[in-house]
Image (cartoon, grey):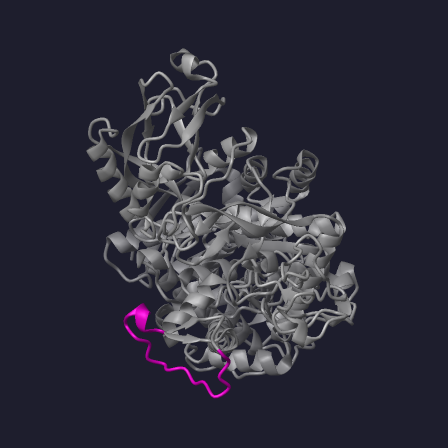
Amino acid sequence: MKSQPFSPESPRPPTHRIPDKPKLEGLETRWTLQWESQRTYAFDRHAERDAVFSIDTPPPTVSGSLHVGHVFSYTHTDIIARFQRMRGKTVFYPMGWDDNGLPTERRVENYYGVVCDPEAAYDQDYRASHVAPSERSSFARISRRNFLELCHQLTKIDEIAFRDLFIRLGISVDWSLAYATIDERAQRTSQRALLRNLQRGELYSQQAPCLWDVTFQTAIAQAELEDRDIASAYHDLRFVDADGSGVMVSTTRPELLPSCVALVAHPDDERFRPLIGGRVRCPLFGMDVPVMTHPLADPAKGTGLAMICTFGDLTDVIWWRELNLPTRAVIGKEGRMERGAPDWIEWPEGRSSYLQIAGCTVEEARRRIVGMLAASGDLIGLPRPLTHAVKFFEKGDRPLEIIATRQWYLRNGGRDPALRDELLRSGEALRWYPGFMGSRYANWVGGLNGDWLISRQRVFGVPIPLWYPLDSQGQPDFGAPIRPDESTLPIDPQSHVPPGFAEHQRGQPGGFIGETDIMDTWATSSLTPQIAARWEETDDCFEHVFPMDLRPQGHDIIRTWLFSTVVRSHLETKQLPWKSAMLSGWILDPDRKKMAKSKGNVVTPTALLDAHGSDGVRYWAALGRPGMDAVFDETQMKNGRRLALKLLNVSKFALGFARAPDGILTESLDRAMIGRLAKIVELATTALASLDYSKAIEQTEAFFWWYCDDYVELVKSRAHGTGSGAASAHRALAESLSVLQRLFAPFLPFAAEECWSWWNGLSIHRAPWPDVRSIEALAGPEETIATVDVVSDVLREIRRVKSESKLSMKAGIARLIVSDSAQRLALLQSVQHDLCSAGQVDQIEMTASESFQVSVTLA
């Protein structure tokens, strides 16, 4: 769709009268209501795919409040959505709510003072208190069903608050497309995709070591990990070989001594060659364990001889698997030592030693074992303090343990080189903005060491839709899951019954049990393109919008959300879910530290919107470059508010003249200004098309301030006159104003809509984007565009002299002498009347010179 030059013969009727004194107050409320009533941002569900621009909008986690980081990144997406809409696209721009998973459960627990007890009976009359006890031990224990009802209740409240703030910010989503990751459609989509993964062999379950969070009581996936440095210590322990000689081993986890299954050294470490193939006896517990070799053993770490336990860290898991070692687990899911002495400790004194730590927390067991080792003489010297990196769940506050449990895994290339290569090629095919972000994806995929653990031992999430038959002894057959028919989805296996069974057979020999695990929240969020686009629903929306055009998101979740979405789309359709990915950075506080709730340095946006207005806050966000972190800066928000108000005021001035029907651009200054404006439109359009919104606003704003400070002042006197010169000014002002208002519309949607409504009937956000060729047709020859530079240079010198003389800009100038090249003087001569009027110049002289110089004689 092309923009047409302003037509003075048939202006569209305005929707609002030009106010005597334009102001920003009240614009957000008025225009929000009008956009909603007129469905300004509605998606055309009948549009063909090539007429659609579709966005896979990030669904914010609604377990809490929005912060300024949301304002930052969602504004970026909205700028692109508004730009594409003005380019003639029908924009598929949904909003989702990521409302299931650990954050929501934790918020519900703390908000209502409850914990979920799967054994508790459902109370249909239960009403939660809104004043939670201060101590978690006093929280009420309620049934799973009651707890889920509270989760749904609180997320609905949070969603309303989030929606209200997004609307106030001017986010132009089509709210009729909204979804939640726990609603019926999302559950149906998630379960359908998972059943097809299972059918194709991409989903499997196994009993295996997994990283376990003892606080949240759930397994954790590789993508959810982070390393944190903690204080620890090396403990040098004495093992005894067959000759009775002592062998020293260093460990940071002496509490795992009862789970020791071997010692390991590097194959080339000559120090331990006599021990390899033999056995040594563990202190305190008396088990004989083999001494083996493996290339991962580090000769420079500790004594060079490592203790393999099941399981102390991820390296233990590798050694256990590759050396075919037994499993000796002593830490339970609660983070405590198992209560009974394990069978593999046969020595009576060893069993007695174990009973001294049975049931202890890991920390207490470590303290007691160190004391026992010191007393027995098996602790060599004092513990040696060190600081080292330990795995944590990104939302947790205690180190993870490694527990052997039955979990569900989805193949993601971590153990399949062919699939890994396919996913790497997908990353190469995706268009990244900024481009260097693609390397983060490649590094993550290349470093995967296992498949995606997608099951979670929690409550509020999408259930894994399976049941298991029970044999005559009541034991489940996990290898033969019972699947539902897709037509029955979504289902909850803890309340629904599998085909061919009745409810009374639940938990009975010969009957069934339902899967109790839910999907990891990323397993649902990885399907946002399918959920939002209504994959295999009754309408044909999916075919009109998929694959999507754009995935906007933070750079910190490339390894989780972006990669997992690529995996799910690849497994289902063998194609990318979107064409482009636009990454945003973090918000930094004034000390250049990342803003985060956990650090207590976040800023909530409501007060900022009250102080600076939505357009002011959006302006600050727009200055943040794609993929780059930005410092929180209220000064920029103040500048944004000033810019929005200036747009209103200059629009009032430009629209204050009667428009001559034959207003042709006869004046050199007017044509030069339009030519320069055409260049800005070209730059802004190219920048926005390549998702560089910050460059677009910078170029537009720079022109706008020149336009207000120089062009408007230069043309003002002529515009108030009569004749062809005035008509040219009126036409130039109208043309440029139409273009500028539209250039600012994606960034300052409220101010742009307000001043556009003073002379147009349709919303600016449905108006066509300015067309460079139409604007160029009004401009003068290419070489005359430099006229604006010449006249601005002279005007700047005039203002400098008046300012240094502490005079008003309206002070008169008796004589002005301009020395410059013949070419530039010729351009200046064509606009000298406007220059003299703007500068209050009585007499002007021009002299040819190789250098630019201005002499000012004040009146």
Please check the rendered image and state whether residue 126 is part of the magenta-colored stretch, yes or no. yes
Q: In which quarter of the image is the C terminus?
A: bottom left
Q: How many marks?
A: 0
In-front residue for pair 843/425: 425
The image quarter containing residue 352 is top left
In-front residue for pair 158/191: 191
Q: Can residue 116 be seen in this view?
A: yes
Q: Can residue 666 be seen in this view?
A: no
Residue 434 point in image, percent of width and height: 55, 44
Residue 491 point in image, percent of width and height: 67, 70
Please check the rendered image and state whether residue 136 is part of the magenta-colored stretch, yes or no. yes
Residue 717 point in image, percent of width and height: 46, 67
450 over 141 or under it: above or below? above
Q: Which residue is painted at 30% across and 75% down in the image?
A: 133
Lateral position of residue 847 relative to residue 657, left or right = left
Q: Quadrant of the N terminus?
A: bottom right
453 over 620 or under it: above or below? above
The range drawn in magenta is 121-139
In-front residue for pair 371/208: 371
Magenta-drawn stretch, dominant element (helix, strand or loop): loop
Instruction: Name the residue at the bottom extreme.
Output: 125
Residue 119 point in image, percent of width and height: 48, 72
The image quarter containing residue 177 is bottom right
Instruction: Name the residue at the front extreme.
Output: 348
Q: Which residue is painted at 58% across and 35% down in the image?
A: 446
Lateral position of residue 263 relative to residue 726, left or right = left
Q: Which residue is painted at 50% across and 39% down in the image?
A: 327
